[in-house]
Amino acid sequence: MTNETQTSNCNDKLCPFHGQISLRGRNFQGKVIKKFPKRVVIEFDRTLYVQKYERYSKRKTKLHARLPDCLKDEINIGDFIEIAECRPISKIIHFIAIKKITGGKE
C-alpha cells in the first residue's frame, strides 16, 4: 500500500496509514457515486450465473467506505478507487478507501 499521501500526517484514528485500524479480507475497485464528509459510496458491476437459464446476469453492487482525512481532498465523485475490508466501523461501513486509481470525468 504505497501512496504518496502517506507522507502527510493526519489525526484520523481510523486511517489505515496513520491510525490504529488494520485491514483484512477482500479488496474491491469501483467508481465513486456519492461523497459524504467521512465516507464514500462506490459502485461496481459483477456477473451472476443463473443456473436455470444457463446464462449470466449483470448486477451492480454498492458499498460504503470510510474516507480517511488524508485522502478526502484527493478523491471526488466519478473517481475510480480501491477499498479494503476492515472491522465494522458502523452499521453500513465495513471498508476503508485506500487509494485512488484514476480520476473521473475523462
Image (spheres, grey):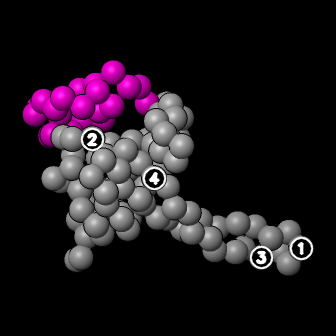
| Disc nearer the start of the sequence (4/3) | 3
Question: Secondary structure beneath disc 1?
Answer: loop
Amino acid residing under circle 1: Lys
Which residue is tagged 1?
52
Amino acid residing under circle 2: Pro
Q: Is residue 52 left or right of residue 106?
A: right
Q: Is 63 a magenta residue?
A: no
Q: Nearer the viewer, residue 4 or 88?
A: 88
Q: Marks 2 and 4, how far apart in space?
A: 13 Å
- In the rendered structure, find residue 68 and report the number of the disc placed on it: 2
Q: Quadrant of the N terminus?
A: top left
Coordinates of residue 63 in the picture (x, y in percent):
49, 55
Q: Is 13 a magenta residue?
A: yes
Q: Residue at x 27, y 41 (%)?
A: 68
Which residue is tagged 4?
64
- The answer to whether residue 83 is seen in the rendering is no
- In the rendered structure, find residue 55 and report the number of the disc placed on it: 3
Amino acid residing under circle 4: His
Coordinates of residue 97 in the picture (x, y in percent):
35, 46
Q: Nearer the viewer, residue 63 or 49?
A: 63
Q: From the viewer's perspective, is the residue at label 4 or at label 3 nearer? A: 4
| Disc nearer the start of the sequence (1/2) | 1
Amino acid residing under circle 3: Arg
